[in-house]
Every structure is written in structure tokens, then in C-alpha cells.
Amino acid sequence: MTWDSIDTAPDKTADPQGPCRGAIDLAHASAFELGNLHVEPALRRMSGPLGTQSVEPKVMQVFLAFAQQPGTILSRDDLMATCWNGRIVGDASINRILSLLRATLREVAGEVPWIETIPKVGYRLLTTGEDAEDETQAPATVNEMPESSSRLSGKDRPFPAWTRSLFAAAVLAVAAVTLTAWLARGRDAANTDTLLIAPMTERSDGFFARGFEEEMRRELAHCTGIRIIGNRGMEDPKDNTSSLLELGRRLGAGFVMRGQLVRTGSRIYLDGSVTNAASGEQVWKARVATSQSLVDDLPRRVANEICSALGGGAPPAPAGKRQGIDKSTYSLYLSALGMIRSRDPDRMEDARHVLQTIVARQQTFSEGWSALAKAEFLLASCNAVDDDRKMRLEAAEHARHAITLDAGNAEAHAVLGSLDRTPQLRLQHLRRATELAPDNAEAWLWLANELSQQGRFKQGLDAIIQSHNVDPTWRRSAQASTAADSLGMIDLADRIDQETIQASTDPAQQNMAQAWMALRHGNWTGFVRAADQAAIDGTQGEMFERNRYSLVARAYLGLLPRPKAPPASPAGMTRYILAGQAPTREDLKRSGISPSEFWCYYLGIGITPIIYLNERRGAEMLSLWRNTFATPQEFRDKAHACNGDPLIFVHMAPYLMLASREMQDPLFANLVQTEAVKIVSSTQNQTHVPAGFLVDQARLAAVSGDRKTAIEKLESGIRQGWPQVDMITQAPFIGTLFDDPAFSAIANDPRFRGLALKLATDRERARASLSAPLQ
């Protein structure tokens, strides 16, 4: 879990009357033009170059509030005054209307006009786009069947800047596979049956293009003999064809596809081509067209064309699950898919509201239900909603309903595989998802996460490497290197990072791969510099995440100055804890963090127990913990829901035991120990175990009085690269082994002292290499 969720709450200090004071009466509002948009308020109708839509009365009222003063910022209070007659309504009601308005504007007018969010202030209507271009004119007639044709003129354009924001996500600690398994992939030579799909473009709605691309990829996944390589880490194809072909060759792709969607009037068509990456010869070039009323069949038609051109077996006929889906609903659905793919919390919230409307209209639309479930799951996972537990339950219910409608819905299986309360069922759903959609890198990543959480480390690393194989441009799949790193597989980890540097077109991702390689080989200066540069090059969410890596490294080396006062925000709590200070209950309240959120946070679990105990605040820590969780099992369940790693309980257990003993509560200490030993026992058959988990077992053994096991596990963890490999895990290590109260019982053991002194020496050497503390 991260604490950098975007705050869109209204500024309560603003003038409650705001710039708009009069209530809006639709019946007496005249029709008007706004750019390429014709608006008829009394009829609740908007018309633009892409079509006509009728809207709810409240949607039209809100639009008129903005249209009266384009560019003027309106707060939520302003909207309530003009559109809800001054009645106070919840954020959810306003969010729903804004989402429907944005979706309608996209559907009828394209990219402008647009409702822009001004964080912590309000919203405004934009009627121009600074990088807007004239629409490329479509030909007067387009054949219904695909035909060979020259490409459209005009430049490809990128998505607007606000679509590129990604939220930070929890990082996996997975493990285990051999180097031979990696080499067996055989990616050194191009595979003639492998297709790289460059991100598609559409001049009026980039979200629609990404959604269309998702659907086409799903259809192509059923084409026998063709393997799809993902493109989540690629920007829009602004580069020329030769650059894309070079990228395809680096990724081992035999073919590269480019495509541009154009919607004009009642028509929609795709200009596409597939080129042999080695020879540069075009093997397919066509304009595939249809009427907008039949847009739901276009992804399949394009997939059939490409499949046939590459000599693959045709995808199976549709199962009829979209039967009765109208053009408007399906187009909105594609735009919602694109918004979900953006991973921006605001856009995913828009997608959620759009999808709620879609499934209300089309209750048998399985793909609509699964997309809604995914939007809800991701929003809950990035802490972008008030009640994440409630939203997870809703996501699971909607995913189950989607599977009831269509048992072959891979996306629904993937979501349910991350949410079901039963570990066996989670694995069943995730494995089914990867069977149904083997080119879904995200499903493979979620499977890797679940396998590692269940202590199946070898299978976990196999799955995350498969995720990397499917989409080496995606930054999340690059975590395969850190998974290998945690097992001490240096050569394998280096190879993955080197491939990421070659494959990625994202400078931030390339810099992070350089950072991991530097840290792996003891170059702390190189690590911090590369991680800092990656933060500068990345999105807002990535900046937080990569700054955290640099902060953790500096904290481990003792280079963070102590803050003068407790923080008043969640973001400030990160630096506060890393500087060696544990918050009080009042500190948490002041910074807006609940106790349950605190114990979900990787630093809350990873670092603060050591600080509490060293400051003789064990009773305070235990009170904070026991007031949040009734039993150790409840903590395990919560850990799975909020930070995705129930094994973290083994890390927390020694400190809970020490605090319980300090409070003269041996019964609770024994209860915690029993639960932790049970988790460790479930992983004993694994031949490879992550370094951090080995050290957690060493702590548990030391507190339990098993000196021999404690030393052996600690030695094994250090051999596999601990503590460096824990720079990105749920429980990073700060300070020295001598500072860790879990090892106090064996502190005088010669073997322990030898290990501790060596780490302390290495730490001082690294500290000297970073000559200045963080400014």
C-alpha cells in the first residue's frame, strides 16, 4: 500500500457561493454552440462530429454550469449550489455525474471540450487543447470489407499528458527458478510467430484506441501459432517504422503491427499494417472498416485479417456474449477499458462510473461486469477510495457474476484470483486466467504474487518470468530481476535487467534497471543516482515509488536527517519513519493515517517495531496493534488484502512476542509464535527461499531460543544478498544487526558477531561512497 493517493477533496475555505450563483433551469435554457459541439439543454441532447447523445438532466445541468464560464474553476460547493439547489450531496454523487459527462463528451466530440480536475480545488471546462490537431479527413466512401489501401496522412499524436499518470503499486517479494529455465526461452533469435503490437492511436480519443487494442489483443490470443508481445511500457508510436522494427528485433518479435483508428460520422475504420521485423517487408496492409453500429465486431475482423496473413489458425466464432450490445454502450466500454489501462486513479474512477451505467443497461454483458470488477479492485488496491474493503467485496461479487455469465472470462478469473478468501480458489482462478489469456502479463504477475504468498517460491518466479516474457516493456514485469536477486541468482537478475534496458522505450524504467544492477554489485552511489533519475523521468506515482527506494537506501546508511516535528501528512510519514522515529497514535491521527492503514504500510510493519522496542515503547506498539487486530489470523487476512503478503506476519511475529513478554503476557506471545511457526512450516519443502524471508525466520528462531537455526538462516540470507535485496520489499532493514532487538538473545554469539561486524563494515564503506546526506 502507498500513501500518495490523489486528494480531490474540495477546498472548504473557498467562497461557498462561488463564481456561479444562479440555479440552472433546463426548460428555459436556449440551444447553443461550443466549439464543435451543439447543445440542446431542454432536450438534454449533445451533438458533435462523432455522434449524438441524450444525457441525464443532472449531467446537462452540470455541463451548463461549466459552459456558462469556460475555463473558470468551479468547486464542488459551486456545483451543489447551481445543480443541486444548494442541497449537500456526497462526493460519490458528484463523481458519478462528472464521469458520465466526461464519457458523453468523449463519445460525441472527442478530446475537447474536456472537464479538467484541479486537485484540491475543483474542475474547469477546457475548450481547446494545446496539442490538438486538425482531424484527418476520412475518404468519402469506405468499403465494408477490408481492402488494401495507402495509409492516412498526418502525424500520429501522443495521449494528452493527463493520461500518463500511473499509481504506485505494492512490490512483490517472489522467488526461485534456475538459470537454465531462463535460457530455455530462446529469445536471442527473432521468433517468426511472435507479434509486437505498437500502441494504437485515435485522434479524438486515446482511451478508445487503447480499449480497442485490448479487445483486438484478446481476439488475437485465440489465433493458433501466433504469440503476442505486450506493449504496456511503450509510448505512442511517434518514432518512424524503422525504429519500431528495431525495437521488435530487440524483443525477439518476428512481426510488428501499427494501427490508427478513425471515427467519422457513422463510420469507423482502422488503417493497419504488419511488417516483418527482420526484412522490413509488409505482410499485411489494409483498411478495415465498418459502421459505428457494428463496432463491436471490428476487433475480431482485424484479428482475423492479421491471423490469416501470418498463417495462424483463425480465432473461434464469438460465443454471443455481446449479442444485443448497442454501439453507444460498446464504444463507451472500449473507452472505459482504456481509462483502466491508464492506471490513473481519477480516470479509473471515471471508468467505474461509466461501467456501472453500462452494466445497468446491459445486465448480461459479461465483459462489462469484469471490467467493472477490475476497476474496483485496482482502485481499492491503490487506496483511492474511502472504504477499500467494501469495494473489494463489490469487485469480487461483480467478477463472480461475470464468470456466471461467461465461464471463459479471463479478466474476471484474474480479478477473483486476487480477491477470493480461499487460497486454493485464488490459485485456481489465476491459473485459469493465464490459460485463457496467456498473453496477459498482468494475470501472470498476479499469479506470481499469489504463489509467492503461499510459499511456492519456485513457481512464483516461473510465473513472473513468464510475465516478463509476455511484456518486457512493462515496468511491473521487470520485477522478475528483483525476485531472482532475492535468491542470490545474480547472473539471472543481471540478464533480466539488461533485457529490460534493451526492450524498454521508457527512460525511467531503463534507469531503474540500471539502479538494481548497481545495488546488486555494491555500487550504492550508482544505485541512488539512477533511482533519483528514474523518479525525475517517471510519472507522479512512479516518482513517489522510486524516491522511496532512494530514501530507503539513504536511511539504511544513516544519511537521513531527523525531522524536527512529526509530519502532518501521509507522505511526510515515510521520511519520518525512515529517519528512525516511530509515530504515536496522535501522530498518526494528525497525518490522516488510521491504525489499520499504518499496519498495512510496509514501513509500519518493517521498521517501526524495531524502533518501538529500542525506545522501550513495546507496550505502546502492542496496544496499537491489538486495538486493530483481534487475532494473529485477522492480521494475516488483512495483510493479504492491503499489502498482498501474508508472509509478512513472520517478520512481525518476533517483535510482537518481545512486546508481549515485556507486558507479562506469555499466552499472547505463544499464540503469535504458533501462528508464525505454522507459516514457516508450510514453506519447508521449498528448495529456494527469498533472502528476506530467511532473515525473518532467523529472527523468529532467535526470539524462540533456537540459536543454531537463527545463525544458519541469517548466514543463508546474507549469502543471498540481504539486506540490499530488501531495499524494495515489504520490510526493508535500517541500521545494523546490533540495533535489532530480535537478535539480542544471540548478540554475544561469535558467529553472529562476525556476521554483524562484516555488514557494519560494508555499511560504513557504502556510507562513505555517498558523501552528502539527502538535502
Image (cartoon, rainbow, N blue to C red):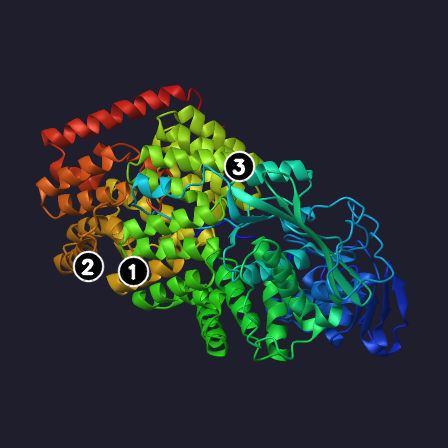
**Vertical side of 638 occupied by 233: above or below:** above
Residue 538 x, y percent position in the rendering: 56, 40
Residue in the image at 41% along x and 31% along y: 517
Q: Secondary structure at mark 3?
A: helix
As drawn, the label of residue 250 is 3
* Relative depth, front residue between 32 and 485: 485
* Relative depth, front residue between 596 and 439: 439
As drawn, the label of residue 636 is 1
Whether residues under marks 2 and 1 lie with C-beta atoms below 8 angstroms apart, the answer is yes
Residue in the image at 74% along x and 72% along y: 293
- The answer to which quarter of the image holds residue 762 is top left
- The answer to which quarter of the image holds residue 26 is bottom right
Relative to residue 512, is residue 721 drawn left or right?
left
**Vertical side of 9 occupied by 189: above or below:** above
Q: Is residue 732 visible?
A: no
Q: Secondary structure at mark 1?
A: helix
Residue in the image at 16% along x and 38% along y: 744
Residue at which label 2 appears: 675
